[in-house]
Amino acid sequence: MPKKEAYPDETLRMAATLYYTDGLGQAEVAKLVRVSQTKISRLLAVALERGIVRITVEEYLSRNEKLEHRLCSRFGLESAAVIKIAKNAGSAATRHALGHFGAPFVAAMLPVTGVVAVGGGRSVAEVVQRFRRGETRRLTVVQAMGSIDSSISQVDALELGRAIVKLWGGEFLTLSTPAFVSDKKTRDFFLASDQITFVWQHLRRADAALVGVASLENSVYTERGVLTAADIAHLRDCGAVGEICGRFFDARGKECASRWRDRVISIELDYLKKIPHVVGIAAGAERAAAVAAALKGGMVKSLLIDESGAQALLAG
Amino acid sequence: MPKKEAYPDETLRMAATLYYTDGLGQAEVAKLVRVSQTKISRLLAVALERGIVRITVEEYLSRNEKLEHRLCSRFGLESAAVIKIAKNAGSAATRHALGHFGAPFVAAMLPVTGVVAVGGGRSVAEVVQRFRRGETRRLTVVQAMGSIDSSISQVDALELGRAIVKLWGGEFLTLSTPAFVSDKKTRDFFLASDQITFVWQHLRRADAALVGVASLENSVYTERGVLTAADIAHLRDCGAVGEICGRFFDARGKECASRWRDRVISIELDYLKKIPHVVGIAAGAERAAAVAAALKGGMVKSLLIDESGAQALLAG
DNA sequence: TTGTAGCTAGAATATTTATGCGCATAAACG
DNA sequence: CGTTTATGCGCATAAATATTCTAGCTACAA
């Protein structure tokens, strides 16, 4: 059944010419075309679709490929994306831009089918929120760490995994636990539960992982008040320079024997090291040491980072 | 001295890509570029100017060249512009569109230097209002007819001449009389004045003229109440089928001996016939007979007309 | 004919974009 | 250098554009 062509190309050309070439407003165009302004708005959209109007933009290269190559060869990375960020961007703005421009890279790094472990964090959230609906994937997304505090937010792994599955299809395995519990006993109690055992099995054989790499100072835990200044000091005493999924590691990339180690419910760093494709996300130069350690420890195999972060990493 | 480049092309490319390609709003782009929405708006304008963004529209042919050729050969016209008009356009809308699309044609027909006689009328006004500032011309614009009634409006030759000179430069000679006076005596009194004698001399040696061609029914005189239904009937009895500059003519293009003939202050049709380039403007099929007569009489040498008018003219 | 589903148009309204304005900083001038 | 004159920024707000919503229309079936 031939769909009726709503408006002839000639009308579209007329409206588009009056609007774009002659520079009239839609209301003026409407008078000449003898329809409402509403319709002109829709007509112009159709003209764009049909290719009667073409808008081309000189390509903007959001990634610094030179730095990417240097990172890959220096640290033996599988792949890297170094995103250019506006000079005066603060840390929230950096994450925002990193998410926007980095999302396609990360989406390409994740498999179309298989098991994917997903951690939480602000940068990770910015990326995940910008994934686009592409071909449907057959993923088993697994929550790689518990929720940061009792009020679930957009940056929790729980929400991020849910979002991925909603967009790309597949199955989502949840932990339903906090990230940190009061003591080892409680942690072991959780770990012994059927649900968590089940999830843990999947984490161990994950094909890929998506995690944020944080420094001690500027992490979501301090922001949310889960960790105090004293806690940070303690961790630093233990040699910690960075954190992934609530687990703290030293400059060599080894997990620190801090008092938090037995209270966290998240993928173990040793598991993470065995996952073939681990995409780490880090925003900001102040994370360079943490990223360096994570790379040394082999926790991260691909990296999404901002330009100043990459520079600091190469300089350090 | 090289003018400082306000923003680097890279920033412009970034903003333009985010806006046009990625489809973000200016407010969202602003967050990523780290400037205000205001600035994004201005940046995008610059990007368009610099050619970083290019918008191309398939050409719209506003003129029906086939009908133009037929008109020229059939009536021996110097040139013709036949403007396509939206189907459901009323007479005001037709004039409006005729003016928009016809203005470039008329502007091209008028000389860059020399004497130009200008009549009044709604269609003429629509055209003149859309003249664009091009190279400066050295015109002597001459008001070819008096003002239609006491309250000068945008369609009076007085205003139109003024507008042309303001836009293109040159000198404007005004009549400062009404189009119609109460009797022959008054008319002769006006004609004897120095100012009018002066203007008349210029009209006689005009290089070009721009006039509207009207029918009896639908003219600005009836609209403004200068002519009553009875007047129209009288004129028709005298054989009038059309009007130019307040002068009525019959189907052969000869001025009618109506009781208005001696009361009008405007260029005589016999003068008009001697002007080398006379551009006539007519909107609407109901004017076809008037236009045909004007062409037969040789008052009009070039024609701007709408499509349905042209069709009626060729059919008649 | 009359009812009804699916569209389409335009009026009302929400959202987005452009612009006038004053302030702050930078360039030009004395 | 101090003063004056420009330039550029973003806020507030006006203007323009997109979207929502409702009514009317067409086509088709009963």
Image (cartoon, coloured by chain):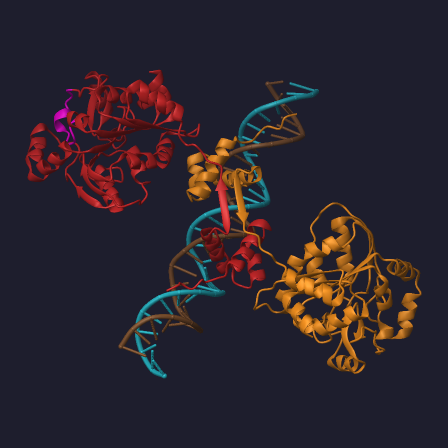
Chain colours: A orange, B red, C brown, D cyan
Q: Residue sitting at 43 percent across and 32 percent down?
A: B61
Report the front residue among B71 and A45. Answer: B71
Spot occupied by residue B145 in the image (x, y as percentages of width and height): 18, 34
Q: Is residue A305 left or right of residue B211?
A: right
- Give the quarter of the figure containing the C terminus of chain B: top left
Asked if the stretch drawn in magenta spans residue B264, the answer is yes
Q: Is residue B247 visible?
A: yes
Report the front residue among A92 and B52. Answer: B52
Image quadrant in which you'd find residue C1: top right
Task: Give the residues in magenta.
Answer: B257-268
The extreme front residue here reads A73
Q: Is residue A130 left or right of residue B284?
A: right
Asked if the stretch drawn in magenta spans residue B70, the answer is no
Spot occupied by residue B71 in the image (x, y as percentages of width and height): 33, 21
Spot occupied by residue A114 in the image (x, y as percentages of width and height): 83, 52
Image quadrant in which you'd find residue A235: bottom right
Report the front residue among A38 and B145. Answer: B145
Please say if C29 is above or below B196.
below
